[in-house]
Image (spheres, rainbow, N blue to C red):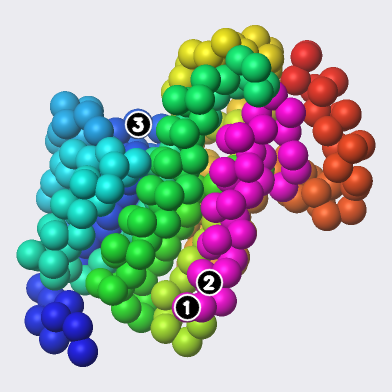
């Protein structure tokens, strides 16, 4: 048996990455309202923003400053888990970002950062936390409706989210019988700071408008409900559900041609 299995666990903890803003911030707020944990660990790079979120919660909340694309920071989180040996009831991997642009306009640095954070950081975080989870625990991995179809001018971002979807589906299968439920959240546009960050690239105008953007509160509520119902995928909106169907039955060349029209509107 591992040390985490033999030491008594005292605190029920929820861990939310990307908790300083956007969907991560909203997940922290809604999990706090459930009153099912003793403490929240809020993970992101900006301490002041995390502290602001923590101050708004009724449950005790601890800012954990980390860049999940850094192996050293992942190692520090592993050590924190070993030191406190929590009973992790929720893991929400909401950290991630995207950039607009094609292969000519997105920098190598942005490409590497998207892959490191959206894929490698999410997997590393999941593997670090899983030994501290047990029956009745919940995992929500924030993917995107971009996972369902290839998206020119968002090619790397869409590919990273397809990775998250496939990884979560396979992980869910591996967790069968453990009582741990894993769900991939695949929303369309959400009213967060995503658009501002996505436009900070050479392809800033490659996607002109985020049509049909949803409120973060709606997306998070539907994600938590889907996870509670043991669903593998939370689409969170009719548009996302439609994209999921399109990805299954429409040839990629047609779906990409349709995207080319939509992104110019």
Which labelled disc corresponds to residue 172? 2
Query: Which of the two discs, 2 and 3, sits closer to the camera?
Result: 2
Q: Tell which of 126 and 31 is nearer to you.
A: 126
| Residue sitting nearer the eye, 92 or 59 | 92
Q: Residues within 10 Å of mark 3 (few under 14, many from 20)?
A: many
Q: Measuring from the top left, give residue 103's x and y in whole percent.
A: 65, 23
Circle 2: element type? helix
Q: Is residue 64 magenta?
A: no
Indicate the secondary structure of the residue bearing disc 3.
loop
Residue 59 visible (yes or no): no
Image point (66%, 46%), residue name: 147
User: Residue 149 vs residue 214: left or right?
Assistant: right
User: Pointer 1 and pointer 2: residues touching (CB < 8 Å)?
Assistant: yes
Residue under label 1 = 175
Q: Which of 227 and 196 lies nearest the eye of the viewer?
A: 196
Give the answer, above or below, for where 181 lies relative to 113: below
Q: Which residues are magenta?
A: 146-175
Distance, label 2 to label 3, CA atoms, is 27 Å
Which quarter shows the C terminus?
top right
Residue labelled with disc 3: 21
Is residue 70 visible to the viewer in this orientation of the structure?
Answer: yes
Q: Position of residue 113 (x, y in %)?
A: 43, 33
Looking at the image, tell me whether mark 2 or mark 3 is earlier in sequence order. Answer: 3
The residue carrying pointer 1 sits among few (fewer than 14), some (14 to 19) or many (20 or more) residues within 10 Å by Cα, namely few
Of the numbered discs 3 and 1, the one sitting upstream in the chain is: 3
In this view, 234 is above or below 179: above
| Label 1 to label 2: alpha-carbon separation | 5 Å
């Amino acid at each position: 048996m591992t040390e985490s299995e033999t030491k008594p666990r005292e605190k029920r903890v929820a861990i939310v990455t990307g908790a300083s803003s956007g969907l991560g911030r909203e997940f922290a707020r809604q999990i706090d309202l459930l009153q099912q944990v003793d403490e929240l660990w809020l993970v992101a790079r900006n301490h002041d923003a995390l502290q602001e979120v923590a101050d708004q919660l009724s449950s005790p909340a601890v800012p954990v400053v980390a860049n999940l694309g850094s192996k050293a920071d992942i190692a520090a989180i592993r050590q924190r888990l070993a030191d406190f040996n929590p009973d992790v009831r929720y893991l929400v991997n909401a950290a991630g970002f995207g950039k607009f642009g094609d292969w000519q306009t997105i920098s190598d640095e942005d490409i590497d950062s998207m892959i490191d954070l959206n894929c490698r950081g999410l997997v590393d975080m999941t593997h670090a936390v899983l030994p501290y989870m047990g029956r009745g625990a919940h995992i929500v991995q924030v993917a995107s409706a971009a996972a369902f179809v290839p998206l020119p001018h968002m090619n790397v971002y869409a590919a990273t989210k397809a990775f998250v979807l496939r990884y979560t589906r396979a992980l869910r299968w591996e967790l069968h019988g453990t009582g741990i439920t894993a769900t991939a959240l695949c929303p369309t546009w959400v009213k967060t700071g995503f658009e501002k960050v996505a436009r900070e690239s050479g392809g800033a105008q490659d996607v002109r408008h985020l049509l049909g953007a949803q409120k973060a509160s709606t997306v998070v509520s539907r994600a938590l409900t889907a996870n509670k119902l043991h669903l593998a995928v939370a689409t969170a909106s009719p548009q996302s559900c439609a994209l999921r169907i399109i990805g299954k039955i429409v040839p990629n060349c047609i779906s990409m041609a349709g995207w080319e029209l939509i992104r110019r509107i």
